Image: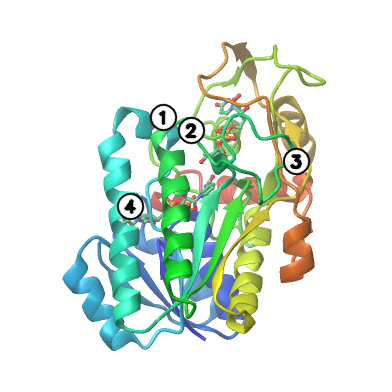
Amino acid sequence: MKILVTGGAGYIGSHTVLELLSHGHDVEVLDNFDNSSAESIRRVEKLAGRTVRVHELDLRDEPAVTALFAAGGYDSVIHFAGLKAVGESVAKPLAYYGNNLESTLVLLRAMAASDTRQLVFSSSATVYGDHAPVPYQEDHEPLGANNPYGWTKVMIEQVLRDVAASDSSWRIGILRYFNPVGAHESGEIGEDPSGIPNNLTPYIAQVAVGRRESLTVFGDDYDTPDGTPLRDYIHVLDLASGHVAALEHLAAMEGGARAWNLGTGHGSSVLEVIAAFEKATGVKVPYTVGPRRSGDLTESFGDPTRAEAELGWKATRSIDDMLTDLWRWQSQNAEGFGG
Ligand code: NAD
Ligand code: UFG
């Protein structure tokens, strides 16, 4: 298949591009490098032993995107491009609604105009909102969110369902990721957050490598076994293989839009993650317990059985694998791609 990957230079995108190449697909990347660097694609090319054509474009540039699709001959699109920092979205809602919604609408129009109607979209467990019972089921309604970033995912999912309902030639996969962590086992590519990491495992890795002094655990008074929140951490390579499985399923599917949870079905606490990191790497992570972070849920994990039944996909890597691979990436690239 010839596949355009939007946001393909980013964290999940770069691992997925590598996985697609290893399955023999023909892959092109569209990215504006707002939150990534071209170095990630150079390393993917080195690992794959193949070149990847990169279109340095903003997805909101409609004339350029339309022209790209008119000439591209793509069979399918995987749409990762977007802004993703929850806290920043609260401070800059218009930037988030603007980028995430506009870029998706431009993409859908350019796809329709060029008769490309197979799409995989990066959604998030955040669409289950504050009140869904765990483990989250794909059919849960109503979807909701507690920050502008999350609402962009809820809104885009609705757009995708409406587009699929309007024309049965669309085949759309909505992948709801849980908490992606880890890195490629080579240590060549991984997550390279700009500024202070928002997420737990990149923060742990930066403390361990000496870039930050100590981790703050955001609250230990939750109603969980050790008082810290539970999350469904999933290895980014398992996530990448989920995209390949979804594409293969869509190619054989009748029209429509369908959502799948991509998670392990299991929650780990913050303290368990710290302990697992120390055990996997032998490196101590100093931490202090601080107040809760606003908006954090007590627990978030999904039921992954639909993806297993329909896509033939299941997460196989353990939390130890995730943290060992994260550490290999971070210790070999203390400053990320810029180092
Ligand atoms: P990332 O920031 O590493 O990758 C996103 C990429 O999109 C970046 O390379 C960025 O430069 C590019 N981009 C952003 N806006 C663009 C635009 N207008 N035009 C062209 N390129 C643009 O993020 P990631 O962690 O790889 O996440 C990928 C997708 O998965 C995002 O849609 C994100 O919301 C979603 N997601 C991520 C997580 C997570 O925890 N990482 C969880 C659930 C869902
Ligand atoms: N945490 C800390 N200290 C830190 C960072 C995080 O204690 O420095 C804790 C958080 O309080 C939370 C857990 O670690 O209990 C995981 O936090 P992350 O920020 O890594 O992940 P979240 O589950 O909060 O956020 C993720 C994605 C978001 C998505 C959200 C809901 O990063 O994009 O899940 O699905 F919106």
- Residue 120 spot, x, y in % from top left: 51, 67
Residue hosting label 4: 101
Q: Amino acid at mark 1?
A: Gly
Query: Mark 2, residues whose alpha carbon is within 10 Å: few (<14), some, or many (≥20)?
Result: some
Closer to the camera in the image, 204 or 96: 96
Sequence-earlier tag: 2 or 1: 1
Q: CA distance from mark 3 to mark 1?
A: 25 Å
Residue hosting label 1: 87
Residue 262 location, quadrant: bottom right
Q: Amino acid at mark 3?
A: Pro
Sequence-earlier tag: 3 or 1: 1
- On screen, 267 above or below 6? above
Sequence-earlier tag: 4 or 2: 4
Residue 335 location, quadrant: top left
- Residue 158 spot, x, y in % from top left: 46, 54
Q: CA distance from mark 2 to mark 1?
A: 8 Å
Q: Which mark is residue 198?
A: 2
